[in-house]
Each structure stands twice: as structure tokens, then as C-alpha cells.
Amino acid sequence: MITGRQERPEPTPVIVLWENILMLPIAGIVDSKRAQEIMEGMLNKILETQARVVILDILGVAIVDSKVASHLIKITQSCRLMGADCILSSMSPAIAQTLVQLGIELGGITTAATLRGAIALAFDMTGFEVVAKKKAATK
């Protein structure tokens, strides 16, 4: 049934990626209300898991303006106050250029070009190492 109301999107999931590592995939539009919900969910998950690193993956964020950038910075600062370092990952070239053109200062925020790079960095920050298994000997 179609109504005049717009459905509320599902809350952004905070994923326990590994021991001490959380990941938050952000997609769509980030307005003030959504940013507040993201921040509250993230901070509660940090408290619950005692995570030391949080990856904010923004691959699904199509547009970043000064307000969105401000929200992302506030989220990273709040996480830091809770004892977790943040990694901002999957920033597109267009978003990087926009942030530079807007004069948004991201100093102090760790970034990674890809989610894979962010995961590797998070493992390094928490003292974990990913090692390939030795292949079983064939007869």
C-alpha cells in the first residue's frame, strides 16, 4: 500500500569486524538527524565492545558538503573521546576534491583509500596480523 509517508530507513549497522575493530558502512544522505543516530549507535557499540578502532566506510555517500563533512568529523571526535581511533575509508576522488575545495581540514583523521586498506591499517593499529595459510602438501 502506498501512503503519503516516507518510510524511515533502517539504522546504519555497526559491525564487529574483528576483536577491537568496528566498521560502519555509511550510505545515502547524511543529514543532522541521521548523523546523530549514527553517532549514538557507534558510541554505544564502542562502550559495549570496548573497541579500539572504528572504520567509517563512506563508499555509499554520493555527496559530501560542509555539513556532511562536519558531521563525519564530529563522529570521529566522539569516537576518540570514547577511546577508539577512527579510520575514514573509501573516499572517492570527487569527494576528496570537494573537501579540499571547501577547505575542510581533516588533519588528525586517519584515512584509507579503500576498505581493504582500512582493515589492514586497523589490524596494524590493534596488533593483529593476517597471515596466509600454508598450502597443504600434495602427494
Image (spheres, rainbow, N blue to C red):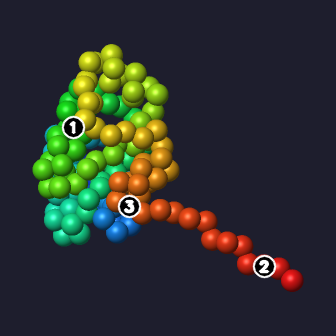
The amino acid beneath tag 1 is: Ile
Query: Disc 2 marks which residue?
Result: 137
Q: Residues within 10 Å of mark 3 (few under 14, many from 20)?
A: few
Residue 30 in the image: state x and y as whole percent: 26, 40
Q: Residue at x 50, y 50 (%)?
A: 116
14 vs 28, nearest the viewer: 14
Q: Residue 38: x percent and y percent? A: 22, 52
Q: Few, some or many C-alpha atoms within 10 Å of disc 1 (few <14, some 14-19, many ≥20)? A: many
Against 93, residue 121 (above or below) is below
Earlier in the chain: of badge 2 and badge 1, it is 1
Secondary structure state at the residue bearing disc 1: helix
Q: Which mark is residue 54?
A: none
Asked whether disc 2 touches disc 3, contact meaning CB atoms under 8 Å apart, the reply is no
Compare marks 3 and 1 and give the one earlier in the sequence.
Answer: 1
Number of the label disc, if any, that sits on residue 73? 1
Q: Quadrant of the N terminus?
A: bottom left
